[in-house]
Image (cartoon, rainbow, N blue to C red):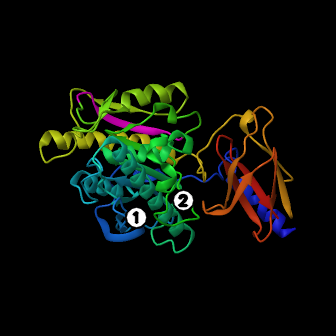
Amino acid sequence: MKKLLLALVLLWLWNPGTGAAQTRIDTTGGRYYRPIFATVTRTQDVTYGAATDFLGNNQNLRLDVYQPVGDTVRRRPLLVFAHGGGFVSGNRSDAEIVELCTRFARMGYVTASIDYRLLFLPFDTVNIGRAAIRATQDMRAAVRFFRRDAATTRAYRIHPGFIYAGGSSAGAFMALQTGYLDKDSEVPAYLGLAALGGLEGSSGNPGYASNVQGVINLCGALGRPWWIEAGNVPFVSLHGTADAVVPYGAGTVGSGLPPQKVYGSAVLKVRATAVGVVNPLYTFKGAGHVPYNGSSATAAAYLDTTTRFVRDFLRPLLRQPATVTAVKASAATAPQVFPVPATDAIRVQWPAAQLFRRQPAELLDVTGRIVRRLRWEQPELLVLRENLPAGTYLLRTEGLASRRVVFD
């Protein structure tokens, strides 16, 4: 009986429909809005994974972590930033990324600047696409690194339900792909996704979720605007109308390479608005690529604007209930789960309004750790408890609303 009551309490706490007990981030006292911390500590050269580079060599992947000095909050939101450089140059110490990480850490966020795999040969648009996939795999590994930490040592005191991906230029491509490139079928066949290791890759920290709760797009683009779908997480964009490197609208990238069409922030806004995804856009009128980068007064003013606009996008999201995934869907796309709670097994019924299709599914615990990988072969899926401890879990699969599972 005590286990049953505990399971029901956990379910109530996790339910976005409940009131004051929902998990949210405390934004009072100017947190996440003003630079309330005078100093920031930067922990450098933290290894978050390793992966095979384009030459077939093993590369250690590292990041720097920025934290506000004197902060006593136990679980804090995290921003993971990636630098630009066209997937051929740049590093986690690029000036504008360091400045952004520092500014947001002073507001109370934990921030991270990541290195990722660079370079590609032959130097063409096929291989720059592969480089973008490898880099996105690395960003996902970094997200998993912090979720693993949140579930184990808690060295960085991260809240696993409030993790956001961001980047500048090529880093923004990565962040957008982390948020919206979520189906193997969306990747052009000529890139050879399977040989690259799939969307998740093998850069480290398997068994933990790599989803994020929002995206920060600074002068980036997507390969296809329709990767953004109804129910996806929100994103914020800042982009110059005169950007000659990454188009503000639709255009091509890869100077000196065969043309590769991509869709910049203006097109992504139209698409996201059409499918109901929150997506504020700040237009730098007449500005070129990454105008916030540099030591001039103009660049500093652009960076100030960038900081304020991103801050104003993020802070309201922190007051919303945290979830392990960000999938939202209508009742017509919600599978039925019974019984709740269950003792030995639960049955999950494919929604009648949708045509059944075979696909994988995952069971996650409340920290976002994947505890079971399943294969949905029939309209009714049987999930055996086996050795799972009592508690609340989340069943997640592509294209359907995630459902809670409770074992007593």
Q: Nearer the viewer, residue 83 or 258?
A: 258
Q: Residue furthest left?
A: 296
Q: Is 238 one of the magenta-colored residues?
A: yes
Image quadrant where one finds the N terminus: bottom right
Q: Does the magenta stretch mainly form a helix, a strand or a loop?
A: strand
Image coords of residue 207 (percent x, y) = 59, 64
Q: Nearer the viewer, residue 108 or 214?
A: 214
In this rendering, the answer to whether 407 lies above or below 239 is below
Residue 329 is drawn in which quadrant? top right
Name the residue at 68% across, 42% down.
401
Residue 91 is at least partly visible in this image: yes
What's under tag 1, amino acid-wise? Thr
Say left or right for 252 vs 232. left
Q: Which mark is residue 52?
A: 1
Image coords of residue 402 (percent x, y) = 68, 47
Image coords of residue 330 (percent x, y) = 69, 34
Can you identify the residue that label 2 sits on? 160
Q: Nearer the viewer, residue 267 or 343?
A: 267
Name the residue at 52% across, 60% down.
159
Q: Is 178 one of the magenta-colored residues?
A: no
Image coords of residue 392 (percent x, y) = 73, 60
Name the residue at 12% across, 44% down.
296
State how far apart marks 1 and 2 are (Cα): 27 Å
The part of the chain drawn in magenta is 233-242
